[in-house]
Image: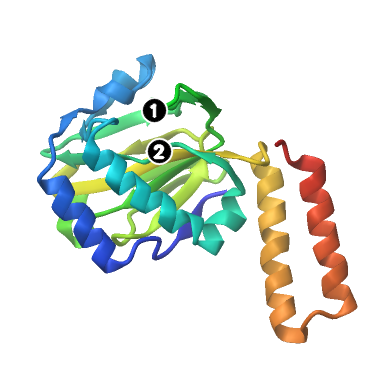
């Protein structure tokens, strides 16, 4: 499931991120790439353990914890501490699939990457190119969102970032280990959740809505790993 999550960060939060990132140290983005990915990755990143990454990552995580759409779609068990990258001067990231398991630097804990996320921190008119392109069974999907908006997509997807030919593309990226491992099961639960919310708005908590809510939780109980 590929999903646009709008307004994860406010405009003020985006401005704070950009101000701190502009003043930060940037290093070769290959430091977080796997063996195959490193061969096609050309960008810069904020060092994972830096004060800037930790401060801004905490801001992103706090915003995600309050975002109902993100939580309904991702059903997060763990969220990898957000990282921050930059593309400019024709930099790009070729076709790759994200590593299946990531290790959190701060505590050494390993987590499965079920869902990949990109949080855009530059407005689309600030740069040319730089689209995130995600392939699925229906073909390639090109994503370029307003600053503060997030895209979620299965970490199993083949994807790439096209060359930035003007300006600078700035973003945060991270991964989610979901309570529900399979993308198809998460998608069914998300669709059911959205339908229940819409139905409740129309008719209130009538017996049908309560029954569907029970179905949702029984499916989550069957599929969740905790």
Q: Residues within 10 Å of mark 2 (few under 14, many from 20)?
A: many
Where's the C terminus, which quadrant? top right
Q: Is residue 165 or residue 168 the one in the foreground?
A: 168
**Which of the marked residues, 2 or 1, is nearer the chain's N terminus?**
2
Q: Which label sits in the foreground, 2 or 1?
A: 1
84 relative to 37, above or below: below
Q: Position of residue 157 (x, y in %)?
A: 50, 35
Q: Residue at x 54, y 39 (%)?
A: 78
Q: Residue furthest bottom?
A: 203
Is mark 2 in CB contact (under 8 Å) with mark 1? yes
Residue 72 lies, in percent from the top left, at 61, 57
- Where residue 10 appears, as percent x and y from the top left, is 32, 66
Residue 18, position in %: x, y?
18, 53
What residue would you read off at disc 2? Answer: 81
Residue 51 visible, this angle = yes
Question: Foreground residue, 200 or 191?
Answer: 200
Tell me the element at label 1.
Answer: loop
32 up-or-down from 171: above or below: above
Question: Residue 36 versus residue 135: which sits nearer the camera?
Answer: 36
Give me the residue at 38% from left, 19% from top.
34
Q: Residue at x 27, y 67 (%)?
A: 11
Identify the image quadrant of residue 179: top right
**Which residue was labeled with disc 1?**
106
Between the C-alphas of marks 2 and 1, the distance is 9 Å
Secondary structure at badge 2 equals loop
Q: Is residue 21 left or right of residue 67?
A: left
The answer, for residue 123, to whether it is visible in the render is no
Figure quadrant of residue 214: bottom right
């Amino acid at each position: 499931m590929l999903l646009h999550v709008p307004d994860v960060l406010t405009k003020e939060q985006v401005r704070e991120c950009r101000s701190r990132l502009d003043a930060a140290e940037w290093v070769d983005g290959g430091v977080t790439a796997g063996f195959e990915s490193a061969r096609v990755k050309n960008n810069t990143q904020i060092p994972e353990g830096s004060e800037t990454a930790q401060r801004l990552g905490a801001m992103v995580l706090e915003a995600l914890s309050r975002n109902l759409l993100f939580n309904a779609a991702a059903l997060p068990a763990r969220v990898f501490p957000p990282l921050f990258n930059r593309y400019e001067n024709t930099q790009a990231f070729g076709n790759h699939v994200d590593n299946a398991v990531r290790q959190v630097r701060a505590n050494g804990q390993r987590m499965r990457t079920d869902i990949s996320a990109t949080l855009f921190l530059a407005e689309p008119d600030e740069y040319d190119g730089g689209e995130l392109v995600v392939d699925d069974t229906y073909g390639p999907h090109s994503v370029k969102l307003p600053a503060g908006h997030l895209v979620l997509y299965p970490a199993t997807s083949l994807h790439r970032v096209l060359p930035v030919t003007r300006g600078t593309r700035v973003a945060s990226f991270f991964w989610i280990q979901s309570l529900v491992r399979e993308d198809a099961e998460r998608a069914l639960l998300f669709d059911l959740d959205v339908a229940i919310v819409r139905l409740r708005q129309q008719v209130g908590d009538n017996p049908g809505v309560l029954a569907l809510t029970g179905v949702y939780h029984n499916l989550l109980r069957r599929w969740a790993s905790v």
